[in-house]
């Protein structure tokens, strides 16, 4: 490309840009007085300095109230139900565990990097995923500690291990298994609530309800413009009344059209609200979780023997026998003492009689 051609193209582009900027500046300059008037009018209304405010239809006002109620309901629910998106909501101790795991992962990568022989190996070590860990939930924590305890009992030396120890190890292992299954049920519940409740509410807020709010803002802007035009017409000089009346009538039509459009949009939002359907999905998810968890725990209880162990029973029997023997001895002593007292009393009486 020659310098002249480049210069020509550059001049053409610069001219187009200048024209575009000029047009935008002109639009802004044209709209500035209107924007200033609208803002001034809105401030005056808020301060109670203006009372001649165009009234909206009662149906429109009621629809606004209902849409606002629906919006607040969605927002309030999400403030709570978003908890189900935090895996460890029932296990606050996960923070310390996560820090420990992070430290271990960092130490592992540092150790691996020290053995890397080239940049490629080092990069692979840095981008390699960390070891997968179990979810940080209360049930998984119970499962883990039960498994560890079961292993401790199972590893007792045969010289000191008893059948009761083997039974305890097996029961703890079974408890670990049932807790892991309940943890899986809880995670399934959380997934359903996240996808069929939280997600739906967020989509409604960002979609239909946000669209209704935009339509309501348009009504507000059109109403302000119309009221400003009415005010300008009332205070206009005779020679400007005709043009200002035409402007006011056009803005009145725009206001009416915007109000009608917003009314239809809000009616559609309320008619298509899936709140109750979404709430049902949440309730079903919780019901399934609780029922399955209860069933698993019932099966665990019924399939394991929780009777007191024999050694404890024998110990309690021996203790009971010793207690009974001691009580028997005490009673015998008391009886002997009573006999002695009677004999003494009898001797005293006899001595008195003899006298």
Image (cartoon, rainbow, N blue to C red):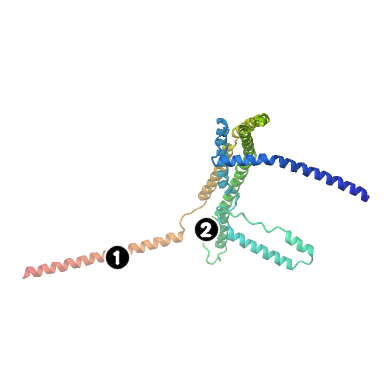
The image shows residue 296 at horizontal and vertical percentages of: 55, 47
* Residue at the limit of the structure toward the front, as seen here: 238
Q: Which residue is mark 2?
A: 168
- At horizontal 79% and vertical 64% (from top left) the residue drawn is 119
Report if the CB atoms under discs 1 and 2 are less than 8 Å apart.
no
- The residue nearer to you, when weighing 207 against 137, is 207
| Image quarter of the C terminus | bottom left
Q: Determine the image quadrant of residue 218.
A: top right
Q: Quadrant of residue 122?
A: bottom right
Q: Position of residue 347 (x, y in %)?
A: 13, 69
Q: Is residue 200 visible?
A: no
**Image coordinates for residue 173, horizontal then vertical, percent:** 56, 56
Count numbered badges in the picture: 2
Taking the spot 16% from the left edge, 69% from the top edge, the residue there is: 344
Judge whether 138 appears above or below 49 on screen.
below
Vertical order, 35 against 253 (above or below): below
Q: Residue at x 92, y 51 (%)?
A: 3
Circle number at residue 128: none
Badge 1: few (under 14), some or many (20 or more) residues near its Cα, within 10 Å? few
Sequence order check: which comes first, mark 1 or mark 2?
A: 2
Q: Which residue is mark 1?
A: 329
Viewer-proximal residue among 263 and 175: 263
**Side of 3 where 82 appears, left or right:** left
Whole-angstrom CA distance, mark 1 to mark 2, is: 39 Å
Nearer the observer, disc 1 or disc 2?
Answer: 2
Q: Quadrant of residue 225?
A: top right
Q: Nearer the viewer, residue 126 or 135?
A: 126
Residue 85 in the image, given as x and y percentages of width and height: 60, 49
Is label 2 in a helix, a strand or a loop? helix
């Amino acid at each position: 490309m020659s310098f002249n051609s480049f210069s020509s193209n550059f001049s053409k582009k610069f001219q187009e840009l200048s024209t575009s900027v000029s047009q935008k500046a002109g639009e802004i300059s044209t709209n500035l007085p209107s924007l200033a008037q609208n803002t001034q009018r809105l401030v005056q209304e808020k301060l109670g300095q203006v009372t001649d405010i165009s009234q909206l239809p009662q149906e429109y006002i009621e629809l606004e109230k209902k849409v606002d109620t629906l919006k607040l309901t969605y927002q309030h629910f999400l403030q709570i139900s978003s908890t189900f998106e935090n895996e460890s909501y029932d296990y606050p101790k996960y923070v310390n565990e996560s820090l420990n795991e992070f430290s271990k992962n960092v130490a592992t990568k540092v150790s691996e990097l020290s053995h890397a022989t080239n940049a490629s190996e080092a990069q692979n070590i840095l981008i390699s995923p960390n070891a997968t860990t179990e979810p940080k939930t209360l049930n998984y924590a119970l499962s883990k500690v039960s498994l560890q305890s079961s292993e401790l009992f199972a590893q007792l030396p045969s010289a000191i291990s008893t059948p009761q120890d083997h039974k305890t190890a097996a029961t703890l292992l079974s408890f670990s298994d049932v807790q892991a299954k309940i943890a899986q049920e809880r995670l399934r519940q959380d997934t359903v609530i996240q996808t069929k409740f939280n997600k739906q509410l967020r989509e409604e807020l960002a979609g239909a309800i946000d669209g209704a709010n935009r339509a309501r803002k348009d009504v507000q802007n059109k109403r302000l413009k119309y009221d400003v035009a009415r005010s300008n017409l009332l205070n206009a000089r005779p020679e400007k009344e005709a043009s200002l009346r035409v402007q006011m009538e056009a803005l009145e039509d725009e206001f009416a059209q915007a109000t009608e459009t917003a009314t239809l949009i809000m009616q559609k939002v309320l008619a298509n609200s899936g709140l109750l359907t979404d709430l049902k999905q949440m309730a079903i998810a919780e019901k399934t979780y609780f029922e399955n968890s209860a069933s698993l725990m019932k099966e665990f209880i019924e399939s394991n023997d929780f009777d007191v162990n024999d050694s404890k029973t024998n110990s309690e029997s021996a203790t009971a026998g010793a207690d009974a023997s001691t009580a028997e001895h005490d009673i015998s002593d008391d009886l002997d003492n009573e006999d002695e007292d009677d004999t003494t009393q009898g001797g005293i009486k006899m001595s008195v009689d003899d006298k």
